[in-house]
Image: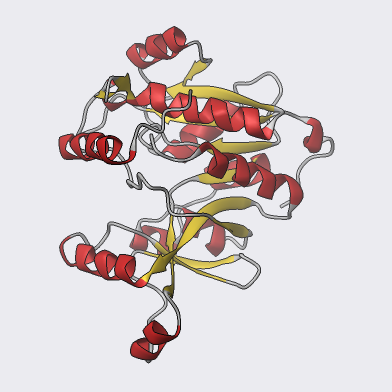
Amino acid sequence: MSEPSGGATRPDLIVVPARYGSKRLPGKPLLSIAGRSLLERVVAIARAAADVAGNCTVLVATDDKRIGDHATALGVACVMTDPELDSGTLRAQAAAHQLQSPPAHVINLQGDAPFIPAAIVAGLLETLRTGSADVATPVFALDWPRLDRLRTHKQSAPFSGTTCARAADGRALWFSKNVIPALRNEDTLRAAHPLSPVWQHLGLYGYTLAALDWFAAASPGTYEALEGLEQLRFLEGGLRVDTVEVEVPAHLLSGIDTPQDLATAEEAITRYGDPFPA
């Protein structure tokens, strides 16, 4: 899906969608993790990534004045978006079109992802700028102990954790809440290599603006609805999704959705140190 002419010179955008109305954790962008609000932590990541990438701006997109006021206090630009938008992807798209000059590429850095390394965010922009992908998203290889833990976790939480099948050039073939691919002769595979053939998805996305607009206009796909995975809408629609191989973040946490997740995040900081960018 091609960009409009001149797109390469337009500034890119990192959007931090931040809703107040989480059912399980109301007002979570304003909640504190080790003395800093969740929004402050994510905005710091976005700023650090924008500095690395260059030609990039940062914007908070929210539906609540309290979050908007906090963003202003943090010194970051903020726009208000429709409370009826039901995903960070749509909030990012709406925010991008509120800018006077629409961005060439958009990163959707969810407001409940305080431990994504800035280098990963900047790497998605590099992939979009230099390749032909409509969408870019990070994945990491699971070693056998991590695969075992994922399988155990799915026995009680089958829709937690997403895996990816990818081509040799990094193009995404499929994503699933099941562990894919199925592994025939697994004992032989375990003996041959410390890494399994399973890739886990890290929930972060970059898009060309054209792809993001296409997503907002398209109806949900059949498999998107079955799996509950937005990225399948792009694959079902024939768009190219490139995966970017990354190292497993030390503070790996899929998101902040419950009070227990807040406690787990603070435990990770105690164990590994605070990754808040200086």
Who's the residue at 60% across and 51% down the image?
135
Horizontal and vertical percent position of residue 88: 43, 37
Q: Residue 214 at x, y = what percent?
A: 60, 46
Query: Front-most of 99 and 219?
Result: 99
How many numbered marks does the figure carry? 0
| Residue 123 sits above or below residue 71 on the image | below
For the point 39% across and 9% down, the residue is: 69
Q: Residue at x 73, y 55 (%)?
A: 132
Taking the image as drawn, is residue 81 in sight? no
User: Quadrant location of residue 196?
Assistant: bottom left
Question: Do we see residue 69 in this rendering?
Answer: yes
- Would you identify the image quadrant in which residue 266 lies? top left
- Horizontal and vertical percent position of residue 137: 54, 52
Judging depth in this view, the residue of 179 and 114 nearest the camera is: 114
Which sits in the foreground, 56 or 217? 56
Res 14 quadrant in image: top right
Q: Relative to residue 104, is residue 258 drawn left or right?
A: left
Residue ID at (43%, 29%):
42
In the rendered view, tell whether residue 49 sits above or below residue 218: above
x and y, in percent, of residue 79 in the image: 50, 17
Q: How is the image coloured?
A: secondary structure
Indicate left or right for 38 with 54 as reference.
Answer: left
